[in-house]
Amino acid sequence: MIDAAPRRRPLTGTVDVVVIGAGHAGLAMSRCLSERSIDHVVLERGEIANSWRHERWDSLRLLTPNWQSRLPGYRYAGADPDGYMTMPEVVGFIDQYARIVSAPVRTGTAVTSVSAADDGYRVVTDHGQWRCRAVVIASGAHNIPAVPSLGAALPRSLQTLTTKEYRNPGQLDDRGALVVGASATGLQLADEIQRSGRQVTLAVGEHIRMPRVYRGLDIQWWLDAIGILDERYDEVDDIVRARRVPSPQLIGTPQRSTLDLNTLTERGVEIAGRLVGVSDGKAQFSGSLRNHCAMADLKQGRLLETIDAWAGQNGKRDEIAAPERFAPTRVEDTPRLSLDLTSGRIGTVIWATGFRPDYGWLHVPALDRKGSLRHAGGIVDVRGLYVLGLNFMRRRKSSFLHGAEDDVHDLSTHLAMYLRDSAKAVSRAPRKVDLTKDHHLGHAANAVAAVAASDWQLGQDGQMN
């Protein structure tokens, strides 16, 4: 049952699990916990699907087609399976899911502190506190805009917006805009602002180029079919690098259009290299634009070759359109290396440079020196702590709406085993909790479980606060 008015009174409770965040991932975990009869509560700082409601621009649509929109026990069943949900449609989809699974959500309840206590955790909110044996962090990876430090050198006369603040071109004055970042978000905003009649300069670094449709099928169909989306975190050589790969240059439109740098150039957007500095009121761009574009073209070509090979090996060659290739990215002979930000040509700088999670409330030793959670596939290396929704968390699809389905199944299984084994340990003589029995989650998960078990004594001593 969803508590839509949690501000009536402070709350204090004891449950087995506290889930932080009532987005799609937190609700999916709630459904799996309920199936296992695990007592839990879902705490949400705002409304259900709060980020989708309040932290997205007006014209945004999902990058995944509707047929791919699913959560445990629930999937899209509308009349437009090949379309792409608008933000109000996403909110409605998640709202309906919360009602169907009867998630025990307490909205308007911001978590201010999570710390170790006795055999579990103390979760403090602005409306009381909870005691629990395990915590699932499902607050997402898009909490704080990752604005580079060089932004501090921008002229104060400029308007600056992050993609969390941008809603539509009506927020901008009539002058041009510098959009920094050329992944999916940067391209979409550059296109929208250029179409509004404002001249856009787009700063481009490393990027992933992809067609929206290939051989008559959505590129997401191909990525799913050839197994790329299901690739696991413990199957890649460098997971740290893999988690930093930019999001593909895709857009969801009723026309199933491809949006790439060539499309933007044709519409009048000026393409520059990566923004590397601001000095004396001038933006400075890297000279590596041509190399970045050539690498993106090369990787796209390899992907299409992989798709073609799979289609041939699986008897699809005669059922679908013929193979195709796309023109290389066009780059000017001498791309711009600087831009005077004081000339009046530019009125706004938009940072499409990504986000990072906010763990300022997490008072347990689970963060590395860069402030990222130490985890293997969502199992944090502090006992009883889990995370959901991070980029390539367990699989390449982890950050997508449908990616939560497999992830919460795996992690809820591990969590249930943790609760069972920790209860047995408490009922016997004091000893470390053995989480290494989780063979079905793979060697990397077992390694983290071993670290988690070694933290048992530290937690008992109360030194994790």
Image (tube, rainbow, N blue to C red):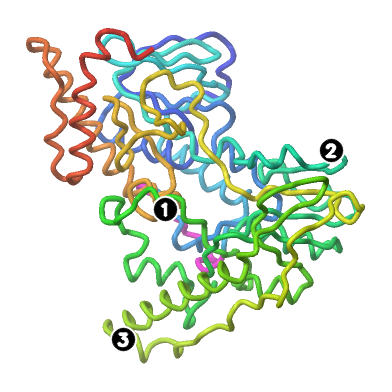
Q: Above or below — where is 6 with respect to 230?
A: above
On screen, residue 300 versus residue 381, left or right, reads right
Q: Residue at x 71, y 76 (%)?
A: 332
Query: Which circle's residue, 2 or 3, is located before the other in the chain?
Result: 2
Main SS of the magenta part reads loop
Q: Residue 78 colored magenta? A: yes
From the top left corner, tell me how far across and down residue 206 is, in percent.
55, 60
Q: Residue 387 colored magenta? A: no
The front one of 284 and 57 is 284
Task: Give the Cα separation between the discs numbered 2 and 3.
Answer: 57 Å
Residue underneath mark 3: 312
Query: Magenta region: which residues?
Result: 72-83
The front one of 97 and 430 is 430
Task: Give the Cα separation between the discs numbered 1 and 3.
Answer: 27 Å
Query: Which circle's residue, 2 or 1, is located before the other in the chain?
Result: 2
Placement of the N terminus among the 4 image quadrants:
top left
Q: Is residue 74 visible?
A: no
Q: Which mark is residue 353?
A: none
Q: Amino acid at mark 3?
A: Gly
Q: Amino acid at mark 2?
A: Arg
Q: Residues within 10 Å of mark 2 (few under 14, many from 20)?
A: few
From the top left corner, tell me how far across and down residue 329 is, in percent.
61, 77
Q: Are marks 1 and 3 in contact (CB under 8 Å)?
A: no
Q: Which mark is residue 402?
A: 1
From the top left corner, tell me how far across and down residue 387 is, in percent.
38, 35
On screen, residue 379 versus residue 113, left or right, reads left
Q: Is residue 277 visible?
A: yes
Residue underneath mark 2: 156
